[in-house]
Amino acid sequence: MNGSLPDIDPFGQGLKKMDSRNMPQWDDWQWQMQNRIRDIDRLPFKWMDPDQRHRLKSVCQTFPMAITPYYLSLINPENPEDPLMRQVLPSVQEMTHSEHSLSDPLNEDANSPVRGLTHRYPDRALFILTNACAVYCRHCTRKRKWSEGWDILPPEEVEGALNYIRHHPEIRDVLISGGDPLLLPLSFLASVLKEVRSIPHVEIIRIGSRIPVVLPQRIDPLLLEVLDKNGPIWLNTQFNHPNEITEASAKACDLLLRKGIPVSNQTVLLRGINDRPEIIKALNEKLLRIKVRPYYLFQCDPVTGTEHFRTSIWTGVDIIEHLRGHTSGLAIPHFVVDLPGGGGKVPIIPDYMMHQSGNEITFRNYEGKYFVHNEPKEPAS
C-alpha cells in the first residue's frame, strides 16, 4: 500500500474494520497524521447531500477540518447526530455568531506578558508551544489560532517565556498546552521540558493534550521516554463521550500511567453530545475503569463559532445533582465556568445547605430528604 487512505469505500463498512489486523500502517501515528481527512468530499456520510457538502466547504475556509482515520473509525457513518461526529464535523452554525461570542473569551492574549505565555493565576503559567492539533475540535477555545496555519513557537520566544518563568519565583506550576504539545518534534519537546524542569521554583509540570483520545498511537516508547525523563509530569486530556473510550485509548492512558504520569480528564459540556446526566455518568465510570480521574466538567466557553454547543449553567448543575449519591465520589468532577474576560475558573455545585437557625443547619441530601446538623457552641470566653 502507498500509505494513503484507500479509495475503496472504506467507510461503507465503517472504518471500524480497518485496523492493524488488515492495515499495517494503522498503528503508525505519523501515517494517521498524514492521512487525516481534510476534505469534506472524503467524508463517508451517505446522508450528506451535495448541497450540504458545498456549504460545509465554505465553513472550512474559515474554520478548517482535520480528522484522524482512527477517530473517524469511531463514528457511526449512518447517524447524522453521532456525538463524536458532531465534535469534529464542520457546521454552518459555526458562521452564526452570538453578540456575546468572543474570539479570545478567556482573555489569554491580554494576560500574556510575553508571546506564548499566559500568567493569570499567581502561582501558575500557561505555556503555549504550538497551535498544531491532530483533530480540529469544533468547540475549541483557541479556535482563533486555526487561521494561522501550523505554528511552533520560535526558539527566541521560547527562551523569552522561559526567562519570564525563571524571573517569577511565584510560578510553581507550568501547564504546557497548545494546540497539542505531544505533536511537537521530540527533540524540541524534550528541550523545553528539560529547561522548565531545571527551574528550581517550578514544582509541577502539566501537559494538556487530546492525543490519548484522538491519536492514541502517538503514545509510543520514544515519547514516553521523554516524558519520563522530565517528570513528575501530570497529563490532562479530554474525553467527552463514552464512545471515545476504546481499547486503543485505554492502552495509551495505561502506558502513561505505568510511567508515573497521572492522567486526569477535563470534559467539555456540549449540547446534544453529552448534556445528559446518564451520559456523563457512563463516561466517568468508564474513565475510572481505565484509571483516569474525572477532574473537570467545563461549561463550554463563549467562543466565536461555538454558540450551538453551549448549554445553560443549570444543565451542568443538574448533571452534578444527578451524579451525587448515585455513583462513586471519584466519578463526580468539579463543574466549573472559566469566566469570560480572564476571571478564571469558578466551581458551581448544587445547593445542599438550605438554611440556618441558631446552631442548627438544615441540609438536603441527594434523595431530597432534609437533615439537621448541629453546629458546636462557641466556648465561653
Image (cartoon, rainbow, N blue to C red):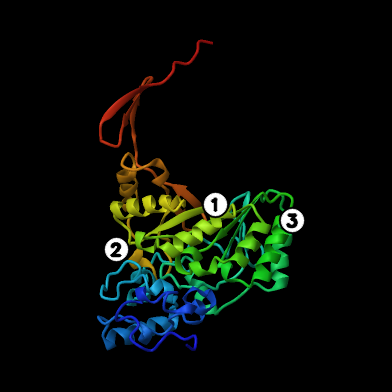
Residue at image coords 54%, 52%: 262
How many labels sit on residues? 3
Q: Nearer the viewer, mark 1 or mark 2?
A: 1
Identify which residue, 185 or 168, lies in the foreground: 185
Closer to the chain start, of discs 1 and 2, is: 1
Question: In the image, 198: left or right of 305?
Answer: right
Q: Nearer the viewer, mark 2 or mark 3?
A: 3
According to the image, label 3 marks what residue? 198
Closer to the chain start, of discs 1 and 3, is: 3
According to the image, label 1 marks what residue? 262
Q: Which mark is residue 272?
A: 2
Closer to the chain start, of discs 2 and 3, is: 3
Residue lying furthest front:
21
Residue 177 in sight: yes
Residues under numbered marks 1 and 3 in contact, where contact means CB atoms less than 8 Å apart: no
Identify which residue, 366 or 106, lies in the foreground: 366
Q: Identify the image quadrant of the C terminus.
A: top right
* Amino acid carrying mark 2 in the image: Gly
* Amino acid carrying mark 1 in the image: Pro
Whole-angstrom CA distance, mark 2 to mark 3, is 45 Å
